[in-house]
């Protein structure tokens, strides 16, 4: 699930925050300008969560008739289950009180029941032993309640009806009797929807039949043959325009992708629709084959500004590429492997958010990935509390963007940095296909166990800090060097972390890049105490140290000025490296400590004919070592292959050197 904030909604949030006592609550709750829903959200309680532990649900069949003008739902829901009790005589299903139960039938026999406090308590007419199966059908009707993000909505678009569901996390029981926990998946499900004949009903799995009823209504019969959590069962109903394209996964096999679009959005949706087959390919290559390949993938528009990863039938407010990628990735992480409980929601949302960056890395390149991770890091720094959600009674707290989404995504980015690309994606594939987890549910411990097995080493420090701990490290780093003879140098690196609460400091492997007068060397140090000194030995004179050059760690960094020892004693202009170069090269020069204060410095590039082609530096600088890139960022296309000269003028010092650009 992902919420999108539109400009009008942001102004709505601003007004609410300005005028209401809810200012302290998450703005996530306020994205829907629906006061009734908002108030419902605050009232929800789950004393009996997570459902009846004495039964194991194996199948749901929802046979629903929608009466739009009356906002009425008439339902016949069949639940198949097995006894988990030594003597099962009675059990309960979760069903919110606004719905009225007419009868409960099992094998043609009416069962006695009591429906109160959101529980439908049913007495069986027999006693069941462990593993014994039973089936009940609940007949009920009424106007479904609204909770969470709008579990069941009789809405509209452009003057036409739109009826949709969004049950996550606690809203399934607002519209059908179920065991309202993700921990107990049914093995399969059927959803039958009877609605006005002008409307189309989308749902999970394959459309087996559309029945034209004598009264002008139609019944859409959808069947899903894969295990499914209660909150991933959905309907989306409107006067849709339909499109289909295909994910071709072998030379001869393809799977349909079905789109259900509001007519007024049909033209704008086409761009997003055209990208989905390649998205499925990109994720399948990295995570394993699309999990529901025997059936379909689908996208159905609904009236909530965001998306929800209903199994094989995502609901979308708009067909935006990032939103589509997020919800599609949930088919692997969320739907195929589902968080066992909402405490571990990052296994859904962190993975889907990270997958947005994975998709754009594959389709647009590493620089787009890096930008998205930087943005996630900005949000992650604002996260409060541990990623493991300790209080799951508050929907806003579970779906806190900074923590469950952004920081969850950054944790995967950091894990990838530690174990490397190939091990990282192997971990994800193994986790997604592991017996007991695939088409089942998982906890953070399950993911950690798989990660450690594939990596071949303990990662408990990592999960303890980043999932169960809070915050992120704040590094103070300084360095110095001395000659060790024979053109080798000893670099002393001091790393000090500000002391936090939980953990007090972060153990992390950290990349350190040493830039010398002839090139770069990148080393990895294990920073495992709060205050630590490292000695690195490098060939050639070190000029710069870059701490975590690839931005693999969520951190604050205070790189203290290099101490005087590193300040040069003479002007110098070094030979650029690499040379010849393509696309860029580094030019290093030094201003000595004898140059007091700031002196004018010019670094200019000329072509073979002596024409000035670039001014790289033209300002006052103090003593130190400087590294300048050529060509300047994003100017590569302006320079042809050939010989160039670069000239440094500083405080009476002048030097010219030659470099070669080879395209
Ligand atoms: Zn999501």
Image (cartoon, grey):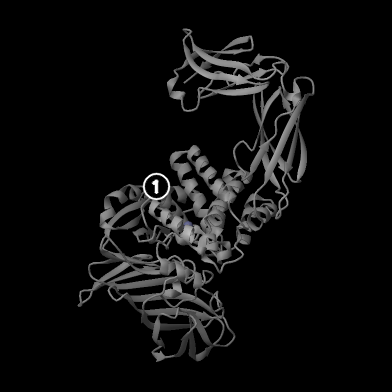
| Residue 379 shown left or right of residue 463 in the figure | left
| Residue 497 shown left or right of residue 423 in the figure | right
Q: Secondary structure at mark 1?
A: helix
Quarter of the rendering containing residue 144: bottom left
Which residue is outermost to the top?
Answer: 609
Q: Where's residue 548, x and y in %? A: 64, 38
Count numbered badges in the picture: 1
Sort mark 1 into few (<14), some (14-19) or many (20+) by Cα contacts within 10 Å: some
Q: Residue at x 22, y 76 (%)?
A: 213
Q: Residue at x 60, y 19 (%)?
A: 620
Vertical placement of residue 504 versus 558, above or below: below
Q: Where's residue 170, x and y in %? A: 49, 70
Vertical placement of residue 172 versus 258, above or below: below
| Residue 544 shown left or right of residue 157 in the figure | right
Which residue is nearer to you in this view: 382 or 200? 382
Quarter of the rendering containing residue 487: top right
Which residue is outermost to the right?
Answer: 484
Vertical placement of residue 361 versus 240, above or below: above
Tell me if the residue at label 1 has its CB under 8 Å from ligand 1. Answer: no
Q: Where's residue 74, x and y in %? A: 33, 79
Question: Which residue is denoted by mark 1 in the rendering?
Answer: 278
Which residue is nearer to you in this view: 65 or 22? 22
| Residue 18 shown left or right of residue 514 in the figure | left
Does the image show residue 182? yes
Vertical placement of residue 349 versus 52, above or below: above
Does the image show residue 225? no
Which residue is outermost to the front?
Answer: 19
Q: Where's residue 399, x and y in %? A: 52, 60
Quarter of the rendering containing residue 233: bottom left
């Amino acid at each position: 699930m992902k919420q999108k904030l539109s400009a009008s909604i942001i102004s709505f949030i601003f007004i609410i925050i300005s005028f209401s006592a809810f200012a302290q609550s998450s703005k996530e709750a306020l994205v829907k300008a629906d006061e009734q829903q908002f108030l419902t959200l605050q009232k929800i309680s789950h004393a009996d969560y997570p459902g009846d532990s004495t039964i194991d649900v194996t199948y749901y069949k929802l046979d629903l008739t929608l009466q739009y003008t009356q906002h009425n739902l008439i339902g016949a829901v069949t639940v198949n289950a097995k006894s988990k009790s030594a003597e099962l005589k009675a059990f309960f299903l979760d069903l919110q009180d606004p719905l009225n139960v007419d009868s409960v039938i099992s094998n043609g026999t009416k069962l006695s029941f009591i429906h109160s406090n959101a529980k439908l308590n049913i007495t069986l007419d027999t006693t069941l032993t462990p593993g014994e199966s039973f089936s009940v059908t609940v007949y009920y009707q009424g106007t479904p309640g609204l909770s969470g993000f709008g579990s069941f909505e009789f809405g509209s678009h452009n003057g036409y009806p739109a009826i949709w569901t969004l049950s996550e996390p606690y809203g399934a029981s607002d519209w059908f009797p179920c065991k309202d926990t993700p921990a107990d998946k049914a093995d399969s499900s059927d959803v039958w929807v009877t609605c006005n004949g002008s409307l189309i009903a989308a749902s999970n799995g394959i459309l087996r039949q559309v029945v034209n009823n004598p009264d002008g209504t139609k019944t859409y019969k959808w069947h899903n043959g894969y295990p499914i959590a209660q909150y991933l069962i959905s309907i989306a109903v409107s006067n849709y325009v339909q499109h289909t394209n295909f994910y071709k996964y072998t030379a001869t096999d393809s799977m349909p992708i079905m789109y259900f679009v509001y007519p007024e959005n049909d033209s704008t949706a086409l761009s997003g629709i055209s990208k989905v087959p390649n998205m499925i390919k990109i994720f399948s290559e990295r995570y394993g084959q699309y999990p529901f390949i025997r059936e379909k993938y689908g996208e159905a528009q609904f009236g909530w500004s965001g998306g929800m990863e209903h199994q094989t039938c995502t609901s979308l407010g708009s067909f935006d590429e990032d939103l589509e990628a997020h919800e599609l990735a949930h088919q692997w992480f969320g739907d195929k492997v589902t968080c066992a409980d909402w405490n571990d929601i990052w296994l859904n949302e962190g993975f889907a958010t990270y997958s947005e960056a994975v998709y754009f890395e594959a389709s647009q390149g590493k620089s787009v990935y890096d930008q998205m991770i930087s943005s996630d890091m900005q949000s992650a720094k604002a996260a409060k509390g541990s990623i493991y959600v300790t209080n799951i009674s508050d929907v806003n707290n579970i779906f806190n963007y900074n923590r469950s989404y952004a920081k969850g995504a950054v944790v995967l980015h950091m894990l990838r940095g530690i174990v490397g690309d190939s091990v990282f994606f192997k971990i994800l594939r193994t986790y997604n296909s592991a017996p007991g987890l695939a088409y089942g549910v998982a906890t953070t411990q399950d993911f950690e166990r798989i990660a450690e097995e594939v990596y071949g080493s303990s990662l408990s420090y990592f999960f303890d800090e980043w999932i169960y701990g809070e915050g992120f490290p704040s590094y103070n780093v300084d360095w110095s060097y001395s000659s060790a003879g024979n053109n080798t140098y000893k670099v002393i690196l001091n790393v000090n972390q500000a002391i936090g609460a939980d953990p007090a400091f972060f153990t992390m492997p950290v990349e350190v890049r040493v830039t010398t007068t002839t090139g770069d060397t990148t080393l990895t140090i294990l920073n495992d105490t709060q205050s630590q000194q490292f000695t690195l030995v490098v060939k050639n004179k070190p000029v710069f140290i870059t701490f975590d050059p690839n931005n693999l760690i969520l951190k604050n960094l205070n790189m203290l000025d290099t101490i005087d020892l590193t300040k040069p004693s003479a002007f110098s202009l070094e030979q650029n490296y690499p040379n010849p170069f393509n696309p860029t090269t580094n030019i290093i020069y030094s201003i000595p400590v004898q140059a007091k204060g700031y002196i004018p410095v010019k670094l200019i590039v000329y072509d073979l004919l002596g024409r000035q082609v670039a001014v790289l530096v033209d300002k006052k600088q103090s003593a130190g070592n400087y590294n300048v890139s050529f060509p300047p960022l994003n100017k590569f296309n302006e320079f042809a292959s050939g010989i160039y000269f670069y000239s440094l003028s500083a405080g009476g010092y002048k030097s010219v050197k030659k470099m070669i650009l080879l395209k």
